[in-house]
Amino acid sequence: MDGAQFAKMLSDKHLFELNRMEHKYSTVSVKEFAELLRQNFAQPLPLTDFSGNKLFYLPNLAQISTNGIQKTE
């Protein structure tokens, strides 16, 4: 996968909706994209899904922005 397509897929607003991503891009591209994310960016969690597969998360995409929080006194 070339860098331009990876960046385009990473910035897609439907990043976490893989079925929509497969319609926009090819199924092979989405699988390759997911594998690259898992290998290079994802952090493992000490949890498994219902099938027994390990769960991962993307720390840079899972961060919560605190810019809108106001301090009250």
Image: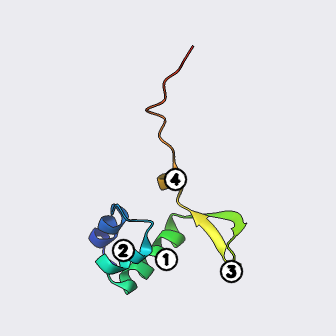
**SS state under label 2:** helix
Q: Earlier in the sequence, mark 1 or mark 4?
A: 1
Report the residue marked by disc 1.
35
Q: Earlier in the sequence, mark 4 or mark 2?
A: 2
Report the residue marked by disc 2.
21
The residue at the point 71 percent across, 78 percent down is 52
Q: Which mark is residue 49?
A: none
The residue at the point 44 percent across, 81 percent down is 31
Residue type (three-letter) at the residue carrying disc 2? Met
- Asked which quadrant contains residue 7, the reply is bottom left
Report the residue marked by disc 4.
62
Depicted 56 relative to depicted 71: above or below: below
The furthest residue to the left:
4
Q: Horizontal and vertical percent for residue 63?
A: 51, 48
| Residue 50 left/right relative to 33 | right
Which one is closest to the eye, mark 1 or mark 2? Answer: 2
Asked if marks 1 and 4 touch (Cβ < 8 Å), the reply is: no
Q: Residues within 10 Å of mark 4 (few under 14, many from 20)?
A: few
The furthest residue to the top:
73
Which one is closest to the eye, mark 1 or mark 4? Answer: 4
Asked if marks 4 and 2 touch (Cβ < 8 Å), the reply is: no
Report the residue marked by disc 3.
51
Residue type (three-letter) at the residue carrying disc 3? Ser
